[in-house]
Every structure is written in structure tokens, then in C-alpha cells.
Amino acid sequence: MKPSQSMRCIEIRKPGGPEVLVETTRPIPTYGHDQILIKVAAAGVNRPDVFQRLGQYPPPDGASDLPGLEVSGTVVAVGQDVDTWKVGDCVCSLLTGGGYAEYASVDADTCMSIPIGLDLIEAAALPETVFTVWYNVFDRCDLKPGESLLVHGGTSGIGTTAIQMAKAHGCEVIVTAGSDEKCQACLDIGADIAINYRDQDFVNVIRDRPNKGVDVILDMVGGNYIAKDLKCLRPDGRLAFIAFLGGSKAEIDFMPLMLKRLTVTGSTLRTRPPSVKRAIARSVTRAVWPWLEKGHFRPKIDRILPLSRASEAHQIMESSSHIGKILLRIDQG
């Protein structure tokens, strides 16, 4: 492949609304000795892409300035030290950026094979959400079979993934969502209880349950949910934050942390070193891929749009009208 070859991609011309996402051409990215070059089939659209477009989530040093944190595709070139993949292999991978493009270079050891039973396009819905849920819910919060999980934002890509992964693990799942339609969508993919937060106070619903509370909470809202989360947790409960859509500041009484021996944690994956992402990729392939291949879990996809309609995908993401993942299909010549 000649370095002078160009590719179609979506770049952020300046911070702003969805209209600042503009289709353009750039050189195909280079790849290092431990990287592979992927011809992208599809890219996932995620909330961090929106924050980057707004100028609130800059890419880490050395990362592509193009949006897109996950892709699926076909290997077209491999670095000299790569022996795990070969040209022609189909893979999906987490990225630090550059997914909204026809080609992407990635760390070879953060790539994963396509689970049996999923097609190449569907697989683009997996890396960002599965990595996030695995790392926060299963690794950091050590969700165990038989325990209960509360997921805020149940119909988001993260939410629909967390529901299915926790059910495959043998857990009870409770979710919050903003409409009866969304609550039903969560129940349809396995949630045990779905709470419309516009009609009910989720704290009262959860504390009135026979076992009074939950063991683990996955929260992407923050704000006034933070204090409420602490009220919902059972003794030795764990709370993981992955975003703060409702704000990162709150007035909190920390006494429940002491009295109930609670653990509060949080993380972002984009800036973590490759060694951490490689370890997560190994864990996900070992533990989650069998759930997918046995039919216990399948990515919930709201819609698939062509790359040229990236701005529309962001509009949908910001409206929160979607149920599951939004994907961009990269149709190449």
C-alpha cells in the first residue's frame, strides 16, 4: 500500500454542533512495528465523540484528531513485530481516535477476533461498550453471580451492553430510563426491573425491594444521582462512574460510605496505557466472547448510517432518542 494513497474520513473543523463534522480526504495512516492497519467496515458512535466535537474531550498526545473510538474491519497490513494477525483477518478494536475513516492503525494486541455468529458490521458495536462495562462493572466493582446491578441510562449503548453482560453472568439487573418505551426495550433484552425516572423516584423503588438495595451501580449521569446512588447501595456495595452527563459536582453526605463500607470508583479508558487495554482485550475475549457465541448477548443496534451522515448520527446521539448503538458504515470503493 503506497503511503501517498488517501482515504475518506470525517474531521472536526472546529468545536461546535454536529454541522462541524465534515467529510474530507487524508493520507492513509502509517502503522508502527507493533500495530496493524485496518480497512474499516464500520465505526461505533459514542458519547465521547460528541464531547470531542464540542472541544471538551481532546485526544491524548499522539492519537489521531479524527473522532471514533471503535471499529471493525479487515487487516490490510501488519507491523514487523506482529505475529498475532495476518492480512485478511477480520477484527474489531478499541482506538484512541481515528475511527471515522476508511482506514485506521491500531495496537495489534488490543484487537479482537469477530465473535462467531456476528457479522463484521455488528462487531463495531462491541469494543467501546464491552471494554467499559467489563473494566468498570466486572473488574473494578467485581460483580459476582447472584448479585444485583443498577444501570443508569439503560437504553444507551453502554446500558444495553451492561444489561446483557450482567444477565449472562447470572445477576439481577435494574435499570433507569426516560420513557415507558425505553423501559420496555430494557426489559425485552433481559432487565428484571425498569424504572421510568420521570414518573418514579428510583431510590424509593430500589429501597422498597425485599432485599433493600443493590450491590453494584454503573452511573453515567452523576449530578444529583450521586447522593441517591449511595442510598441505593447495600452494605459492601460498589459504585462506578463512567461519565457525568448531569454534572460532576454534588453535595454528598459521606457517612453511608463508612456505615455500609461502600466503594466508589470511576475511570476513563482513552488515556490508559496500551498495557491496560491489552489486558482488558484478553479478559473480554476469554469471558465475554463465549457469551456472544452462545447467544446470551448480542449488541443492540439502533441504526446504521453511512459515514457521510456522521453529523446526523451525532444529532441522534445528543437527542438521546436512540436505543442501543449507532454505527457508521464505511462503504469503500
Image (cartoon, grey):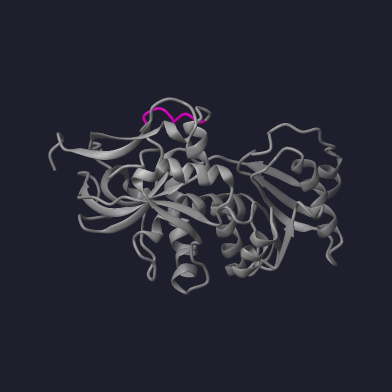
> In the depicted view, which residue is nearer to us: 293 or 50?
50
Question: From what the image shows, is residue 192 above or below residue 307?
Answer: below
Residue lying farthest to the bottom in this orientation: 294
Q: Left or right: where does residue 308 sit relative to residue 179?
A: left
Displayed quadrant of residue 102: top left
Task: Tell me if residue 61 is in the magenta stretch.
Answer: yes
Dominant SS in magenta: loop
Q: Is residue 260 left or right of residue 111?
A: right
Name which residue lies at 45% across and 44% down.
312
Q: What segment carries the magenta color?
A: 57-62
Q: Position of residue 156 (x, y in %)?
A: 58, 53
Residue at left offset 76%, top offset 51%: 198
User: Count of labels shown?
Assistant: 0
Q: Can residue 233 be seen by looking at this rendering? A: no
> Which of 259/183 is in front?
183
Magenta segment: does it hold 127?
no
Q: Residue at x 86, y 46 (%)?
A: 259
* Residue 201 in sight here: yes
Determine whether 71 is above or below 300 in the image.
Answer: above
Q: Where is residue 80 in the image (x, y as percent from the top left)?
A: 20, 44
